[in-house]
Image: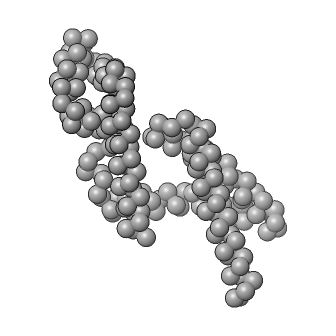
């Protein structure tokens, strides 16, 4: 499982870097303005911002590296840290399991708990997708729906597989 997570993590970073590279090619003025804003937030004067912009945009590799690190927040050292990525994944799975498991401790009947669990998981997935849009820079509703659909298919498949195994082998 760890190699799959590592590969997915690396693919995510590479996709973000490719997207940033496209943005630099397709809309350099917008990307240049983003550099100004970054330095403006750090307290640089307009003249200092322009010096930084000219220096950074004079080399495409430097420009891409700067945008990836400063705008997206991806550091090259983060791409290949499997233990850190594994720890983050484990904590994420534990947090994600809470809305699914908690109703079974609270409600009296399995049917009632299952309905509440499914509803809370669907809401949780959509909200998680909305939050993900801050990182991926995709529209919040698209990111929410994407996460909801992928999570629903995943959860539904697991539930269906569990039912098949329970009915046929247990």
**In percent of the image, x 30 and y 33: which residue is there?**
67
Q: How is the image coloured?
A: one colour
- Front residue of 170/105: it is 170
Q: Residue at x 73, y 53 (%)?
A: 119
**Could you tell me residue 91's position as x and y percent?**
47, 59
Q: Is residue 161 left or right of residue 10?
A: right
> Height in image: 79 above or below 68?
below
* Residue 68, placed above or below residue 14: above
Please name the residue shown 57% across and 37% down the image: 140
Residue 82 location, quadrant: bottom left
Q: Quadrant of the N terminus?
A: bottom left
Q: Is residue 115 above or below residue 68?
A: below
Name the residue: 45% across, 59% down: 89
The image quadrant that residue 17 belongs to is: top left
Image coordinates of residue 93 in percent, x first then y, are: 52, 61
Question: Measured from the top left, where is residue 60 in percent x and y?
Answer: 22, 33
**Depth check, front residue: 3 or 14:** 14
Residue 15 drawn at (x, y percent): 39, 47
Q: In the rendered view of the protein, which quadrant contains the C terminus?
A: bottom right
Q: Is residue 55 left or right of residue 160?
A: left
Q: Which residue occupies the extreme front position in the image? A: 26
Picture mark count:
0
Residue 98 makes an appearance in the image: no
Q: Is residue 77 visible?
A: yes
Q: Residue furthest bottom?
A: 169
Please state which of residues 59 and 71 is positioned toward the viewer in this rendering: 59
């Amino acid at each position: 499982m760890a190699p799959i997570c590592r590969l997915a993590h690396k693919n995510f970073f590479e996709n973000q870097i490719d997207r940033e590279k496209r943005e630099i090619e397709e809309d350099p003025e917008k990307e240049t303005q983003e550099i100004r804003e970054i330095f403006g937030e750090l307290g640089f004067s307009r003249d200092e911002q322009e010096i930084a912009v000219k220096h950074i945009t004079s080399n495409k590799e430097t420009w891409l590296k700067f945008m990836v690190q400063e705008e997206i927040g991806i550091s090259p050292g983060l791409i290949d840290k499997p233990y850190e990525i594994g720890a983050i994944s484990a904590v994420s799975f534990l947090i994600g399991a809470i809305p699914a498991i908690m109703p079974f401790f609270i409600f009296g009947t399995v049917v009632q708990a299952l309905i509440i669990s499914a509803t809370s998981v669907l809401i949780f997935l959509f909200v998680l997708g909305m939050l993900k849009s801050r990182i991926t820079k995709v529209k919040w509703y698209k990111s929410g729906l994407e996460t909801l659909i992928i999570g629903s298919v995943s959860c539904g498949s697991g539930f269906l597989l569990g039912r098949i195994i329970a009915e046929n082998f247990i």
